[in-house]
Image: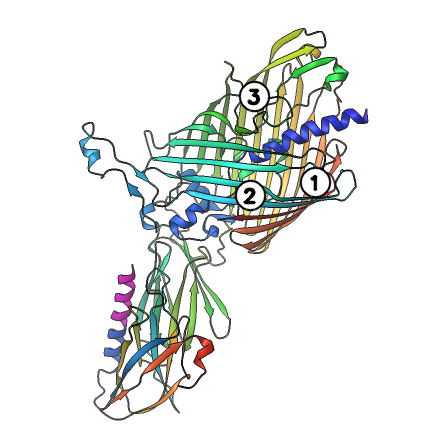
């Protein structure tokens, strides 16, 4: 039985860590160059955004009255006067005046404190290199993309490296008030998949949230008597699709249609070692998602003028914005299933599933805390192996506090429960996990940080022994 | 932006000089050149170091307080303007926010290391602050870490703020309407020091005193010469 646990562990861990590369880049220093400003203008401590950075992101990488702040002017692809001549002339546009490229590098050392890994100490130096591009093409078009090269080792058990690619283009302010209706095409969900209040791109810790890093485990093929099992490997992460989103003073929404679950070989990196995030074998099953967020207090997302603009306040810091943000997230999809037994008999079917989540994030002075709860259900995730539907819940509580502007302490408790069937051969029905993350983040410079983080699993440690009782040292630099 | 900064500095100097000596009939003038030695000054960009402040501190007496003097420092485009502002002791500076961002003003006394957060305010709001003690105050914004400016609070109303156009070309300064007497002439520059330190001078009634000043890196400044 231990053998099957290890197998499951490797499968989940491998897929989970693959997804660690799936979020938005950790920072976009090209904007620091464009405005000749510090990272701290937009980041609490990168990657987490402060109120200015969140607004800048939501408004399509622009400040209100953006020209005032630019130190590098864009290159015109046509004078503004040509707008008056349309349709007899090309509509003018801009391209960035300097290269929109940024680089981020992560270096990691993993120390296994309980001796369950093959390698007690693992050097991943570097662990990850990101090439990021982002910016605007005129007033109403923004773009983003990244190429991320990773190497993983999984405690000396499964060394591998691969490259992922993401890109999107957004047409803003299609009609109505500014930024109320924006159309995004490409890798949707780089900024909006999952709960607004627990975005991976805003994470403090070394690893992403559990709720974006898990999916339903597959059975052990040998014990299940199968030669192939393609289950529902959906997880909450960026995908390829089209999204309508909008932002106002206090509200944000996103509605999208996406490819849905990837029909990639289960639990492994893409066969080509280079893949567009969210890519996979297409089917006619497209998934739908929606997202709502509302901000109470603090700086409005659209940066419209309102108090405290006309009041004086002391004690302001770039990370402070006393506000409560509520978010709702929903996803509905259909996954293609396939099993092939040892005799070559093929069974194909579908699994309809949904996820519904609610999140809170409260920033008050030097403390940020957040709660997340997501429930979900799959009506038939194991196809002809079991008729049982599978319900699941994920929740976490997170808190962090500033000791100094450069020193942050944080902790998080996460829980994942899956009501797995007990009649599938080769599938351990108890794969619930509880996880504790405790760490400290040191901002060595505004663009360089170091994390010292300890992770352990009060429940499910045998499934995640590669991360259980492990000390991570992460050094990240962005420029 | 550079032009605006320079214009503000020059305008302020002219304004102050005129005020200080309006009724002084037997006053003298202190003038001279300032040159850069074994160093360069950056004359462009929002955080240039082209400005030099020459100031006089009377020996054996205290200069009058210039509490009628007012000056302005703007915050616009995530930049303090001007980058260097010289004001006499007792002057009041109005800190404006002409951005659509919130801005903060946070003082760091260069000599004592003392800090003072005078607040954070939004677009269109301004706050006055009176500088009662001579010295150099580094002015920061806690919300935009790259923003910085320098308020040079002179001991009295006798000072001149001038700006280099290049490292190779000396600039002339002139302080008019200086009452006769003994003074210490000192120079402030963001990065460079006055070679040989402060200079004692004697201003005679109705006459001009010429002083040529060299500024250089701190490691060379203590050398006589």
| Magenta stretch, residue numbers | B1-12
- State the residue in front, A201 or A114: A114
* SS at badge 2: strand
The numbered mark at residue A362 is: 2
How many other residues sit within 10 Å of disc 3, few (<14), some (14-19) or many (≥20)?
many
Q: Which residue is drawn at 45% across and 34% down?
A: A252
> Are the residues flagged by discs 3 and 1 in contact, CB closer than 8 Å?
no
- Does the magenta segment cover residue B95? no
- State the residue in front, A39 or B57: A39
The numbered mark at residue A261 is: 3
Q: Which residue is drawn at 23% across and 91% down?
A: B207
Q: Residue at x 59, y 21 (%)?
A: A264
The numbered mark at residue A436 is: 1
Q: Which chain carries label 2?
A: A
* SS at badge 3: loop
Q: In the displayed image of the protein, which residue is found farthest to the right?
A: A1
């Amino acid at each position: 039985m231990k053998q099957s646990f290890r197998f499951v562990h490797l499968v989940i861990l491998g897929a989970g860590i693959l997804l660690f590369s799936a979020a938005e880049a950790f920072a976009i220093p090209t904007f620091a160059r464009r405005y000749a400003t510090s990272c701290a203008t937009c980041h609490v401590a990168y990657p987490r955004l402060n109120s200015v950075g969140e607004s800048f992101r939501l408004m399509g990488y622009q400040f209100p009255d953006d020209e005032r702040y630019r130190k590098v002017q864009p290159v015109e692809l046509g004078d503004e006067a040509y707008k008056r001549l349309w349709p007899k002339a090309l509509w003018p546009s801009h391209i960035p005046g300097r290269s929109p490229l940024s680089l981020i590098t992560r270096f990691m050392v993993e120390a296994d404190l309980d001796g369950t890994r093959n390698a007690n100490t693992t050097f991943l130096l570097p662990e990850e290199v990101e090439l990021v591009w982002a910016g605007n093409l005129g007033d109403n078009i923004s773009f983003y993309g990244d190429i991320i090269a990773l190497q993983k080792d999984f405690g000396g058990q499964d060394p591998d490296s691969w490259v992922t690619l993401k890109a999107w283009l957004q047409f803003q302010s299609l009609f109505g008030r500014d930024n109320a209706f924006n159309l995004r095409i490409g890798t949707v969900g780089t900024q909006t998949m999952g709960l607004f209040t627990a975005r991976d791109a805003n994470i403090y810790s070394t690893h992403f949230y559990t709720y974006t890093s898990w999916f339903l485990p597959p059975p052990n093929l040998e014990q299940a008597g199968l030669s192939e099992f393609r289950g529902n490997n959906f997880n909450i992460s960026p995908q390829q699709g089209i999204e309508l989103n909008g932002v106002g003073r206090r509200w944000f929404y996103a509605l999208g249609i996406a490819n849905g679950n990837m029909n990639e070989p289960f639990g492994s990196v893409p066969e080509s070692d280079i893949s567009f995030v969210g890519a996979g074998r297409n089917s006619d099953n497209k998934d739908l998602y929606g997202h709502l967020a509302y901000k109470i207090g603090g700086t409005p997302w659209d940066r419209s003028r309102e108090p405290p603009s006309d009041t004086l306040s002391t004690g302001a810091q770039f990370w402070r914005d006393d506000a409560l943000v509520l978010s709702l997230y929903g996803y509905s999809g259909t996954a293609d299933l396939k099993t092939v037994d040892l005799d070559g008999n093929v069974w194909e079917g579908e699994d309809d599933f949904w996820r519904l989540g609610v999140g809170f994030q409260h920033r008050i002075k030097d403390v940020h805390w957040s709660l997340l709860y997501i429930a979900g259900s799959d009506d038939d995730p194991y196809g002809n192996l079991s008729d049982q539907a599978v319900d699941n819940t994920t929740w976490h509580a997170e808190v962090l506090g500033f000791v100094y502007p450069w020193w942050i302490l944080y902790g998080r408790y996460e829980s994942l429960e899956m009501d797995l069937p007990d009649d599938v051969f080769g599938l351990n029905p108890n794969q619930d996990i509880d996880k504790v993350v405790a760490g400290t983040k040191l901002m060595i410079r505004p663009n360089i940080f170091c994390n010292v983080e300890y992770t352990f699993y009060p429940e499910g440690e045998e499934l995640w022994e590669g991360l259980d009782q492990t000390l991570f040292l992460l050094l990240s630099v962005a420029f | 932006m550079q032009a605006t900064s320079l214009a503000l500095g020059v305008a302020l100097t002219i304004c102050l000089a005129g005020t200080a000596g309006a009724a002084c009939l037997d006053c003298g003038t202190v003038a001279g050149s300032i040159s850069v030695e074994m160093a360069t000054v950056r004359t462009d960009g929002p955080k240039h170091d082209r400005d030099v402040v020459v100031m006089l501190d009377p020996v054996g007496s205290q200069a009058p307080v210039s509490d009628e003097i007012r000056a302005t420092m703007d915050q616009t485009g995530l930049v303090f303007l001007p980058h260097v502002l010289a004001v006499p002791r007792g002057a009041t500076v109005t800190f404006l926010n002409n951005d659509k961002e919130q801005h903060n003003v946070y003082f760091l006394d260069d000599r004592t290391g003392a800090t003072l957060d005078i607040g954070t305010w939004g677009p269109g709001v301004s706050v006055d602050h009176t500088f009662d003690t001579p010295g150099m105050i580094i002015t920061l914004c806690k919300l935009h870490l790259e923003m910085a400016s320098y308020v040079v609070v002179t001991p009295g109303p006798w000072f001149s703020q001038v700006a280099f156009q290049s490292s190779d070309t000396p600039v002339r300064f002139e302080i008019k309407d200086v009452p006769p007497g003994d003074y210490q002439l000192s120079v402030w520059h963001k990065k460079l020091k006055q070679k040989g330190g402060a200079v004692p001078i004697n201003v005679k009634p109705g006459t001009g005193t010429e002083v040529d000043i060299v500024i250089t890196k701190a490691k060379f400044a203590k050398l006589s010469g």
